[in-house]
Image: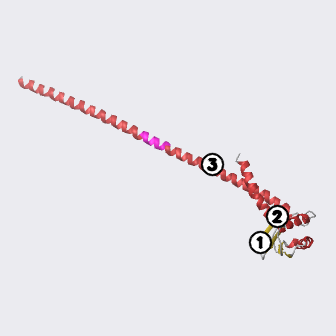
């Protein structure tokens, strides 16, 4: 029986060693699973944070782009409204020519353009205003000539010293001066 006892002892020793190896392997496997789980959690957390940051950046860009588009649209509406008003004003001013109200307005524009200047001048007017300009130049006692070469809806351009000094006093030049102020005022009102 001694051999049976030896085999049984060897078998028990082998079972004990297998159990120990399995226990150590299980501990190592559990540690590896825990480490992998922790690493997966870190990776997931990092990717979620990166995705959140990406979404935040994209949404900020989208909001900024939308705000910029709103400003562009608002500026276009503002400019269109100002253009429409000034086109209407230019039309009404152009309609003054040939009316009784136009002569005193034309005389005032010519008077302002020549105020404080001395010497001979060239009064440039639209062809339709040539006769009126001749009459007012004579009435004012101005020294110079009338040149019906100007394209304008009304008013004058007066040139002194062979064109080195030019004074514009046309309806268009007056509208242009007011236009910048009007656009700024409309922009101020719309931005409130």
Secondary structure under tag 3 reads helix
Coordinates of residue 79 in the picture (x, y in percent) = 72, 56
Q: Quadrant of residue 13?
A: top left
Say above or below: 123 vs 23: below
N-term-proximal mark, 2 vs 1: 1
Q: What kind of element bears circle 1?
A: strand
Is 181 in front, or is 13?
181
The residue labelled by disc 3 is 67
List x then y, in percent, for residue 5.
9, 24
Q: Quick one: quadrant of the C terminus?
A: top right
Question: In the rendered image, which residue does mark 2 sit on?
Answer: 171
Residue interval drawn in magenta: 44-52
For discs 2 and 1, the disc positioned in front in the rendered view: 1
Q: Is residue 162 left or right of residue 26?
A: right
Does the magenta-highlighted stretch encompass residue 30? no
Foreground residue among 123 and 36: 123
């Amino acid at each position: 029986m001694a051999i049976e006892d030896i085999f049984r002892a060897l078998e028990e020793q082998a079972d004990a060693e297998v159990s120990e190896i399995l226990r150590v392997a299980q501990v190592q496997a559990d540690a590896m699973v825990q480490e992998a789980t922790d690493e997966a959690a870190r990776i997931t957390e990092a990717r979620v944070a990166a995705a959140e940051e990406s979404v935040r950046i994209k949404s900020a860009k989208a909001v900024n782009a939308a705000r910029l588009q709103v400003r562009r649209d608002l500026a276009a509406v503002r400019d269109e409204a100002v253009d429409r008003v000034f086109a209407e004003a230019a039309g009404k001013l152009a309609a003054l020519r040939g009316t009784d109200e136009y002569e005193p307005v034309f005389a005032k524009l010519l008077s302002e353009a020549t105020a404080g200047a001395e010497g001979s001048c060239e009064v440039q007017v639209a062809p339709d205003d040539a006769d009126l300009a001749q009459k007012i130049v004579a009435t004012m006692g101005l020294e110079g000539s009338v040149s019906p070469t100007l394209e304008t809806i009304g008013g004058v351009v007066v040139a002194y010293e062979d064109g080195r000094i030019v004074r514009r006093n046309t309806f268009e030049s007056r509208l242009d001066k007011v236009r910048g102020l009007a656009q700024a005022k409309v922009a101020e009102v719309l931005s409130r």
